[in-house]
Amino acid sequence: MKVLAFLATIPIEGPDERAAAIPSAQAGDLAAFEALMRRHERLVLVTALRLVGNMADAQDVSQEVFLRLYRNLDKVEEARNLPGWLYRVTVNASHDVLRKRPAADPMEYAAHVPASGLDPQQSTAEAERRRVLEMSLRLLSEKERAALVLRDLEGLSTEEVARVLGSSEATVRSQISKARVKVKGFVERYFRRRT
């Protein structure tokens, strides 16, 4: 969590700096590309972390996303299109990582989460809610997880999620609805098991 706290402190430039960075990076300006990376690393890393469930894989995904950005800078037309492109590539890179990983039972993971003896920060109700959310996301199919993360955790509209995932809005609404039902069921089972 210290990494996420650090990422929250990264300043974000104004619209003029954002608009200028893409053409400069496309022209080969490495400093402009580094500025693009710094500006969007939090978006990519946090989204990847929510999709893959651990920091090591999220960092690998983030690295892959920015490598793909560097290779495909010519495909990004405007600064306002970049976040959508980054979400799409982050989802795809996360799917690649998840496909290589053996399936795990989230309830098995929950059984190994210690109930007591945690440091004060982890013992708060907020820390437990985060752990339960991370475990519940592991239950979802890749498409459901991506739709739910982008809509409910990243705050994109259903239309934006559909565009990022290359799906119809109806499909995205269905995936989100199914995901919410599964998450709710997992949370209820988790807390019943803990009491």
Image: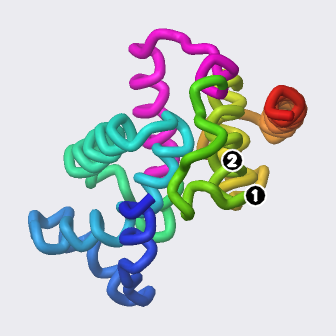
Secondary structure beneath dot 1 equals loop
Dominant SS of magenta comes to: helix
Residue underneath mark 2: 161
Nearest the viewer among 125 and 187 is: 125
**Badges 1 and 2: C-beta atoms under 8 Å apart?**
yes
Which residue lies at the image location 40% right of the left edge and 82% below the top edge?
12
Measured Cα–Cα span from mark 1 to mark 2: 6 Å
Mark 2 closeness class: few <14, some 14–19, many ≥20 residues within 10 Å: many
Q: Position of residue 79 (x, y in %)?
A: 42, 70
Q: Where the C terminus falls, by quadrant?
A: top right
Mark 1 closeness class: few <14, some 14–19, many ≥20 residues within 10 Å: few
Which residue lies at the image location 10% right of the left edge and 64% below the top edge?
28
Q: Is residue 104 visible to the viewer in this orientation of the structure? A: yes
Which residue lies at the image location 51% right of the left edge and 57% below the top edge?
119
Question: The magenta stretch spans which residues?
Answer: 85-110
What amino acid is at disc 2? Val
Q: Position of residue 30 (x, y in %)?
A: 10, 66
Residue underneath mark 1: 157
Q: Is residue 142 visible to the viewer in this orientation of the structure? A: no
Q: Is residue 173 left or right of residue 31?
A: right
Q: Is residue 117 left or right of residue 56?
A: right
